[in-house]
Amino acid sequence: MNKLMNGMQRFWRDEEGAETVEWVLVCALIIAAFITAYGTLSGNISALFGSIGTALTNATP
């Protein structure tokens, strides 16, 4: 029982796990920002490339 309590106390004081969780949350926030930006800008980017393609097709050599 004493061994279990010592292990639990070590686990409770250990801060490496908390740092890992913080990095996971930061990465998740960055990924969420990219997904949101992609969803917002994808229509604009598609229209831009469409107009570039049309301009290149209509260009005279």
Image: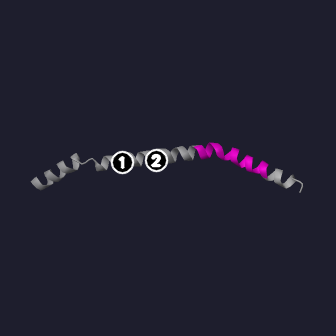
Residue drawn 47% across the image and 44% down it:
29
Q: Residue furthest front?
A: 61
* Residue 39 seen anywhere in this rendered image of the structure: yes
Amino acid type at image mark 1? Val
Find disc 2 in the rendering and name its residue: 28
Residue 40 lies within the magenta run: yes
* Residue 1 seen anywhere in this rendered image of the structure: no
Along the horizontal axis of the image, is 60 left or right of 26? right
Residue drawn 14% across the image and 51% down it:
6
Observer-nearest residue: 57 or 12?
57
Please tell me in which quadrant of the rendered image residue 40 appears: top right
Is the C-beta separation of discs 1 and 2 under 8 Å? no
Location of residue 41 in the rendering, given as x and y in whole percent from the top left corner: 65, 44
Q: Residue furthest right?
A: 60
Which disc, if any, is residue 21? 1
SS category of the residue bearing label 2: helix
Amino acid type at image mark 2? Ala
- The colouring scheme, among rainbow, by chain, secondary structure or one colour, is one colour
Along the horizontal axis of the image, is 1 left or right of 39? left
Residue drawn 79% across the image and 53% down it:
53
Q: Of marks 1 and 2, which one's residue comes earlier in the chain?
A: 1
Characterize the magenta stretch by its predominant secondary structure.
helix
SS category of the residue bearing label 1: helix
Crowd rating for badge 1 (residues with CA inside 10 Å; few <14, some 14–19, many 20+): few
Observer-nearest residue: 10 or 56?
56
Location of residue 25 in the rendering, given as x and y in whole percent from the top left corner: 41, 45
Along the horizontal axis of the image, is 30 left or right of 47? left
Q: Magenta span covers which residues? A: 37-52
